[in-house]
Amino acid sequence: MKNFLIVILIIGGALQFSSAQSGKAQLPEFQLEKSDIEAQLRFIASDELMGRRTGSIGNNIAARFIAAELEALGYRSPEGADDYFQKINFAASRPPREGSLRLGDKDFALGEDLILLDGEKKTVKAPAVYAEYGWIDEAAGRNDYADLDVKGKVVIILSGLPDSNDPSEVFAAMSTKRKLAADRGAVALIEVYTLSYPWTFFRNYFSRERIEPSAGENKDGLIYAWIQVTDRSDIEALKNGKSLSVELESGNGTYKSMASQNVIGVLEGTDPKLKEEYILLTAHYDHVGTGRQGGGAFGPQDSIFNGARDNGIGVVAILGAAKALAKQRPKRSVIILAVTAEEIGLLGSQYYAAHPLIPLEKTIFNLNSDGAGYTNTEAAGIIGWDRTGTNKSVEQGLAAFGLEVIPEPAREQGLFDRSDNVSFAREGVPCLTFSPGFETFNQELMKNYHQVTDEADTVDFDYVQKFVQAFAHTARLIADADKRPVWVAGDKYEAAGKALYEKK
């Protein structure tokens, strides 16, 4: 009799487990079809979209496609958006192709140790003045222009910020540095390169056409340059009060206005209270364009950088999640945000973080999808692992489709601060990036990263289906969780999180 009862209990437990598993398998994300995912990715990465460069026709077509998908699924366009678009004005500029610099008795050559980022045809002969980082932060009690007269002079400063050499922060600070110098009457601003990554990378990037948020054409007359200095003795002498003369010559740059957009749709949650909280799902839909725009190797047979992996997979991940969550809505509300201009400095996500259409203090988590590709089709790389209390949800989301966690892949690359999630982290929103499976930036991964070979025909769609399903299921688990994610104690963004949610 005793043995019989044990058998009954075992069978009963097994039936309950089987029933639970069966119930889980009825969730819409388990029914996402490979054919639909493949069709979406093939369109996003098609030659007709010409590499989806920010501001291009292909970029705009991709945006309209995503908006149409969200509308068909019943997502609403929030207040402040124009038919699912958050429009952003950009400027495409090309730096002067002629110019030279003589600093004291040292000459600098354009395209070698000198970059002219902006300017008009003119020659400046003026004394130099040293202003450290050329930065003002009243909250921190910093004013590098205090007691300095820079009117009619050339301002020499160090690159970066006083407390950061993070590339995205450095790039974001450039327009502010320029304005601070121009507002004080400087005739030129020269930044001395001190960043940790190679000068050649920086020089090549800023010597070609750049796309940035529009601040209006250069009307302040300021010449803005960067230099690489191997011997900084003159800079040190200037810092210590020695006079230094500058002769700077610039050709004309070119400038044109252009537009792009973030794409946004909102789905209301089912819980009367929790629907006031939002989970934000993001992926960038732009890529690098064609030919020389792309930065990688190309030839007459193929000059289109299709971006199937980067970030076509991320786009179909948020669209798959959008479909699954619309068919069976979670407790919390959902924001689907496809951002533009990631490839040129995370500009789309930075713009949304600065101009959110749903208050960030109501946004309890950002689940981002981005990646260079994959080398492991049995896992996903989780960037931001063990930082927000979401490990269990992520593990369950992946395990449901036979995938494992690769925690913090390529840690040495600092990837958390190089994708769109960081735009929200800086504001305090807990977040992580869900990336296709890889451990390191090895040769196998890099053979397609930002290459013309990154096409849909080379993608493993069986794996992409599982990745998309796991992303959607993870989003549901976090959106339905009793406890909202928070930064773990001691995280670099913990203080920002506390400050953000104190606004509620």
Image: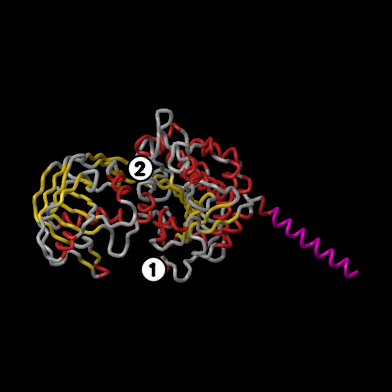
Disc 2 is placed on an element classified as: strand
Name the secondary structure under disc 1: helix
The residue indicated by pointer 1 is 499
Q: Nearer the viewer, residue 477 or 334?
A: 477
Q: Residue at x 23, y 61 (%)?
A: 133
Residue at figure coordinates x 57%, y 49% from the top left? 376
Residue 147 location, x and y as percent?
Answer: 13, 67
For disc 2, the marked residue is 260
User: Which is more toward the observer, 173 or 156?
Assistant: 156
Q: What stretch is highlighted in magenta?
A: 1-22
Q: Which residue lies furthest to the right in this view?
A: 1
The amino acid type found where label 2 is placed reads: Ser
N-term mark: 2 or 1: 2
Is 391 magenta? The answer is: no
Q: Can residue 92 be seen in this view?
A: yes
For label 2, the crowd category at 10 Å Cα-Cα, with few meaning under 14, some 14 to 19 and many 20 or more, is many
Say which quarter of the image contains residue 289: top left
The residues tagged by marks 2 and 1 sit, at their Cα atoms, a distance apart of 31 Å
Q: Quadrant of the N terminus?
A: bottom right
Amino acid marked by disc 1: Ala
Q: Where is residue 432 in the image (x, y as percent from the top left)?
A: 48, 58
